[in-house]
Image (spheres, grey):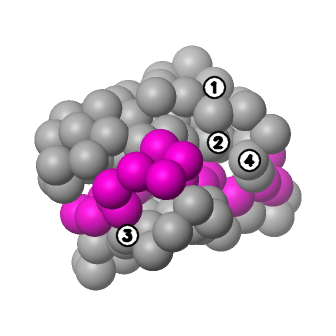
Amino acid sequence: MDYRQKVTSGTVAKATTGDDPVELIAAQPNDVLHHVRIINEGAAPGFYSIDGGNTWERLPAQASISDDDVIVSNTPIMIKRVSGGTDLSGIFASTW
């Protein structure tokens, strides 16, 4: 039986304020998570990382992504804007 709990970024949307990455969900020690969902309610596209910023995937504007066959183990889930671009806003995430 799987007792993993869902972890979310919270009830307040996350946003960027420059080119530096922002942590959506902190690393979860001792958990191996297999599902990630990120919702971008904002008008700007950006990038997300499930491995603490080592690799980045595209996060479209006003869209959601869902990765259901990944391994997230003790690393934060992060977002960043396009370098020099518009800040991201309205970002929510969950993982389990």
Q: Are marks 2 and 1 in contact (CB under 8 Å)?
A: yes
- The tag on residue 50 is 2
Q: Is residue 47 a member of the stretch shown in magenta? A: no
Q: Which amino acid type corresponds to the residue marked 2 in the rendered image?
A: Ile
Q: Is residue 96 left or right of residue 59?
A: right
Against 45, is 57 above or below? above
Q: Is residue 51 left or right of residue 45?
A: right
Cα separation between marks 2 and 1: 9 Å
As helix, strand or loop, the secondary structure at mark 1 comes to loop
Q: Which amino acid type corresponds to the residue marked 4 in the rendered image?
A: Gly
Of all residues, the one furthest to the front in this rendering is 84
Q: Residues within 10 Å of mark 3 (few under 14, many from 20)?
A: many
Q: Residues within 10 Å of mark 4 (few under 14, many from 20)?
A: some
Q: Which residue is mark 1?
A: 70
Q: Which residue is mark 4?
A: 53
Q: Which residues are magenta?
A: 73-93
- The x and y percentages for residue 34 are 60, 33
Q: Which amino acid type corresponds to the residue marked 3 in the rendered image?
A: Ala
Tag 1 or tag 4, which sits nearer the N-term? Answer: 4
Which residue shows up at 73% across the image and 32% down it? 55
